[in-house]
Image (spheres, grey):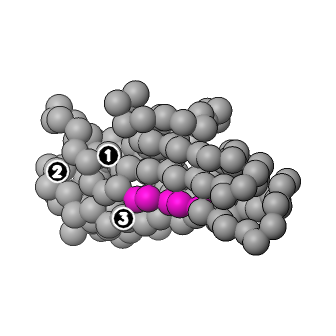
Amino acid sequence: MKHDPYMPYITCGKVSENTLPAHRSVNEGPIVLAELKVHSRHPQPHVLFNYSQNLSYQVLGENPEIQLTYQLVKTPYKRDPVLLETWNFGVSLVFPADVSDLNTVEPLVLNYCDHTDITPQTQIHYSFQLSETKTNHASFEVLSQTASAIILNG
């Protein structure tokens, strides 16, 4: 049976196992969480990028806060990187009494559909990054993560 080159296909990304800092400013540069490469045989494919993670956080004192900024960057072959989207994730809790050692796992799923302008036989590199972190009386870690893309040609 022949493969139809116009049929959609999926590609899986590579995720990193970085230890994430409690505080990181935009000026320090992003941390790459996941990346994948898309190679199309046809011009102008649509790429549906998907990133998911399980984020564990722990409350360590009064008025805990976590602010995370994610970004998706596309780098077409022999072109400059393009910031496609930015997402903000925040947790701010106010408790009537002192609550400590509260552990929570929160799923996070982000999708982005990109209509590319590439020519056939060209590669695009997508990078999902954590660009800024800020915490107050809380800690967090990424327990698991995945990245993939569905490519629609034609």
**Type of amino acid at the residue the image marks with label 1:** Val
Q: Tell me: residue 99, above or below residue 37.
A: below
Q: Nearer the viewer, residue 131 or 5?
A: 131
Rendered image quadrant of residue 93: bottom right
Q: Label 1 to label 3, Cα distance in Å?
A: 11 Å
Magenta segment: 87-91
| Three-letter amino acid code of the residue under disc 2 | Ile
Mark closer to the chain start, 2 or 1: 1
- The residue at which mark 1 appears reads as 73
Question: In the rendered structure, which amino acid carries the disc numbered 3?
Answer: Tyr
Residue sitting nearer the eye, 86 or 75:
86
| Residue at mark 2 to residue at mark 1: CA–CA distance | 16 Å
Residue under the point 43% across and 46% down = 128
Q: Which mark is residue 118?
A: 2
Q: 87 and 46: which one is in front?
A: 87
Give the quarter of the image for residue 113: bottom left
Query: In percent of the image, x 36 and y 50: which residue is there?
Result: 72
Which residue is situated farthest in the front direction here?
97
Mark identifier at residue 82: none
Expressed as whole percent of the image width and height from the top left, the position of residue 74 reads 29, 46
The answer to whether residue 54 is above or below residue 15 is below
Q: Under tag 2, what secondary structure?
A: loop
What secondary structure is the magenta-colored segment mainly? strand
